Image: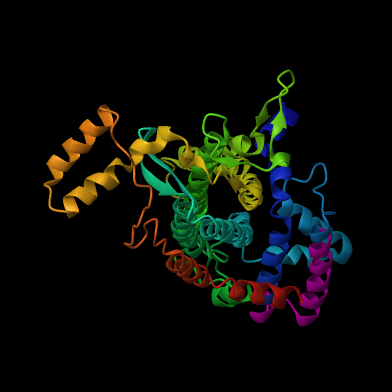
Amino acid sequence: MTAEIEKFTVGRDREMDLYLAKYDVLGSMAHITMLESINLLTKEELNVLLAELKQIYAQCERGEFVIEEGVEDVHSQVELMLTRKLGDIGKKIHSGRSRNDQVLVDLKLFIRDQIREIAGLVKNLFDELIQQSNRYKDVLMPGYTHLQVAMPSSFGLWFGAYAESLVDDMQYLQAAWKITNRNPLGSAAGYGSSFPLNRQMTTDLLGFDSMDYNVVYAQMGRGKTERNVAFSMASIAGTLAKLAFDACMFNSQNFSFVKLPADCTTGSSIMPHKKNPDVFELTRAKCNKIQSLPVTVTMIMNNLPVGYFRDLQIIKEVFLPAFDDMKDCLQMAAYIINKMTVNEHILDNPIYDPMFSVEEVNQLAAQGMPFRDAYKKVGLDIEAGKFTPNKNIHHTHEGSIGNLCNDKIQALMEEVIAGFNFQKMQHAITTLIK
């Protein structure tokens, strides 16, 4: 049973650890630089180790790094490669740390990069939505409640609503970033080290905002960090899934409100008239899958007492690949929104006339008729077929058809983006690998 037990316990670690390879190298570079500062490595040993680690990092960047058969994980592979090249010097890099804080720092470095990429893609989609909102700001469309035609809306409002939703999603992502951007390195197995580690030094070298100070809490962060990040991605995914549903519905023949780009639709195998919105349907499904991620992570880590447990290994299998899905969905959504066109003559169809009833009620009330009497009069006119809508809409309050406040929404997004301060992280990592 030895082989079966090893297969069961290693699981998909070799596959998942390829996501973390270059970050394991970065963490090791910072760690050994600190070890030299406390005299656990000589300057000469540090220099040869750093040179070789930079070579391994370059391999990772080229996609050439592999975890060999029989090697348990990325940490063992990096140490094996160093030892093959440098002999016993390679064995010294593990002083003062455990696999526990090693994988913690790998995960946090990986997540930071992923959040930076996601934030950029969210901003791209946001810009496309704002552009379309401004482009079609004067084109009216029906607004719905209970899927019933309700009141006048506009494509300016529809596109702009999803843009503002992304601002709130980005706030959530920033919170996840701030929780992630704290250094666990030096917590070792969760109880610190007898070596006089300089944890502030590794914090600065890796561009973290601060460290996870309490070493026990640093280990308790395993799973919690992934769950918090998963919630932030689920928030973005919720916005995308709703947008995809709207667009698929509005693209259908029954609505014909929008037209999706031809290359994002597919034909039927037997019905030549059909163009199916496959890209947005897959986006919706992938985003709904992402929205389940926080629950999956919670159920894996739920009720574990303090300390490390192997259960946490399984989180990687559902968590790490989710970033690829998230980024793909954001790219597809931005492309479709950019190419989407809208029907500027929806309201030529008299089926939508009743949605102007509230405008008529409000006008009568403004002229002095009690609101309830105006409501009743318009309702009776509609039943009698005597209602003639006035389609000249003049809403002026903030956030309405005539006053979208897109400039305010853009200012909010810029403020949130500035709060990440990705430049600090990028400068630190660039300095380290040079």
Q: x and y percent of residue 88 in the render? A: 81, 65
Q: Which residues are magenta?
A: 34-59
Q: Residue at x 79, y 71 (%)?
A: 49
Q: Who is closer to the viewer here, 391 or 177? A: 391
Q: x and y percent of residue 286 in the render? A: 59, 38
Q: x and y percent of residue 11 in the render? A: 68, 36
Q: x and y percent of residue 238 in the render? A: 48, 44
Relative to 395, is 158 on the left or the right?
Answer: right
**Location of the C terminus (image quadrant):** bottom right
Q: Is residue 48 above or below residue 59?
A: below
Q: Who is closer to the viewer here, 268 or 212? A: 268
Give residue 287's quadrant in the image: top right
Q: Is residue 40 visible?
A: no
Give residue 57's quadrant in the image: bottom right
Q: Residue at x 63, y 61 (%)?
A: 113
Q: Is residue 78 above or below residue 245?
A: below
Q: Is residue 204 above or below residue 9?
A: below
